[in-house]
Amino acid sequence: MKLTGKALVYGDHVDTDVIIPARYLNTADAKELAAHCMEDIDKDFAKKLKPGDFVAAGVNFGCGSSREHAPLALKTAGVSCVIAKSFARIFYRNAINIGLPIIVSGMDIKDGDQLEADLDHGTLTNVTRGTKESFPPFSPFLQTIIASGGLVAAREGGHL
Amino acid sequence: MSKMTMTQKIIAAHCGQETVTPGEIVLANVDMVLANDITAPVAINEFRKLSNPTVFDKEKIALVLDHFTPNKDIKAAEQSRFVREFAKEHDILHFYDVGQAGVEHALLPEKGMVTAGDLVVGADSHTCTYGALGAFSTGMGSTDAAVAMASGKVWLRVPEAISVVLTGQLPEYVSGKDVILHLIGILGVDGALYSSLEFSGDGVRALTMDDRLCVCNMAVEAGGKNAVFPVDDATRQYLTEHGAAQPVVYAADPDAVYQRVINIDLGALKPTVAFPHLPENTKTFDDIPQGMKIDQVVIGSCTNGRLSDFVAAAEIMKGRKVHDGVRCLIIPATQKIYRDAMHMGLFDIFLDAGCAVSTPTCGPCLGGHMGILAEGERCVATTNRNFVGRMGSPKSEVYLANPEVAAASAVLGVIASPDML
Ligand code: SF4
């Protein structure tokens, strides 16, 4: 799978309370959640984001609450992929389980940079800056989940 | 010979392997799957996408309505009803509604639903609390919970571990909360990312079960996958008193491999406060400026909403008044804690002081209801997170502390240690 879009860049420790604040968790409706995604950290997020864009961040992205509403809101808002120096573990597994691509990379990315990710070959290109990096592949079991289209589909496919 | 940590041994036993290696991904059998009124609706939606949506064991699923309950608004009421109907449809044994419920991580140990050696997963990040009982327990997402409810299995990356060796005894006004805040201050909020925190040492004996539950509760605030205490007489006594199943005891191999060893002398700890907006921003009163005015105090949550927390707070509050202009909320974490506190006369002390006493709920801890902060307001809370907007306005501030500090702050109207009274 190839993804292209521009990057919206945030800092370290972006927690799930700012990705989707608890005051909106009285619904599990993905579109409603997406409408409020990231608004406490960037009130123009929904306006700035074009479908297919990337979110790029520092360390420990998605820390805090286990709310799957967080990756779901990002995905539904149109984020094609999250790139971070590291991910909090529950966010990491939630993203894989719901089929939101994530990449662990320390690449130098500035707000607005045009990016390309090739998930099959494990490469990330910063078109604006002319840099390219490869990232390590997921372990075979996680690849099975991703290839199935998420954990529920993997269960349907008899993988667990 | 294996060289496994306590956590790795529990995981190995639940995936039918002799040994497991850090980094390996395994499919493990679960002893209990947990979800709440926020995470269960998402899980149920995913569960219903399965072609065979039946539960693997109706006695091994816990559904607790605790976050936005008693329902804070119409949408929350719909979510509660959705979970209630699912519980009925599948005859879920451990379904807890308003009137029986309480904050999930206080409720499960109290009801004896977790025992030593269990593997517990929950769609709530503080599921790591039950490590205090010698279990492996960890938080995950709703889709994980959905598939675990159907299959009784979960995928796990076998964690590395950090060893935390405790010695000595806690001084006055210092409790489990200060141990874990101190540790998070050392590790940082991602210092234990993907790892277990394994506690050991003579100091373990000096910690009550409530202290240990509080310590394990906040492992996730250091990024940890789980935390675990060795099983001792206090654990066994707690499990027996609460009617838990017979414990299965695992201990780390003497030559288990740790990424890092941290020594903590409990006797050297002081009351510790985490400043906004990360739990790692810890300070003791040596560094806390005097006269930091506050607007609200919350004593409750899965971290410090147990009976011993209210006993400690009441000792400070007794014969004193909440400072003018401060709202002090007392939120016992379960019905039983509520009743015990009431029978001990603690409510009289709190009410005489001018506190509001609430029915069990997560409420303000996650900025849900029952004590939301306005812009510019400052709160001292015994909860576990102080992220931007966690208790209300993105421009409010939450300071995390133990119950004695919270009570002293309520009385003095500023962030204060009990010594200042
Ligand atoms: S009390 Fe707070 S941290 Fe604990 S389960 Fe409830 S919302 Fe989560």
Image (spheres, coloured by chain):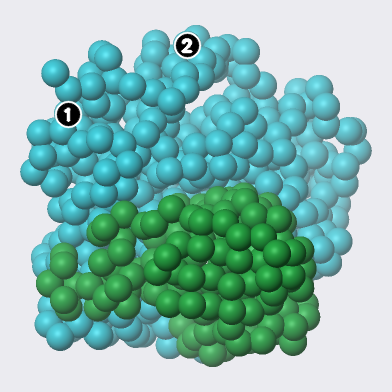
Residue furthest toward the front?
A130
Question: Circle 2 marks a residue in which chain?
Answer: B
How far from the left and from the top, in percent, is residue B387?
67, 55
| Label 2: how many Cα within 10 Å (few below 14, some 14–19, many 20+) | some
Residue B272 located left or right of residue B264 = right
Residue A48 located left or right of residue B259 = right
Residue B39 versus residue B103 in the image, above or below: below
| Number of numbered markers | 2
Q: Quadrant of the N terminus of chain A?
A: bottom left
Shade representing chain B:
cyan
Q: Which mark is residue B167?
A: 2
How far from the left and from the top, in percent, is residue B372?
69, 67
B221 and A43: which is toward the camera: A43
Chain coloured green here: A
Residue A154 versus residue B309 in the image, above or below: below
How far from the left and from the top, in percent, is residue B39?
41, 71
A29 and B50: which is toward the camera: B50
Q: Which residue is mark 1?
A: B249
How far from the left and from the top, in percent, is residue A130?
70, 64
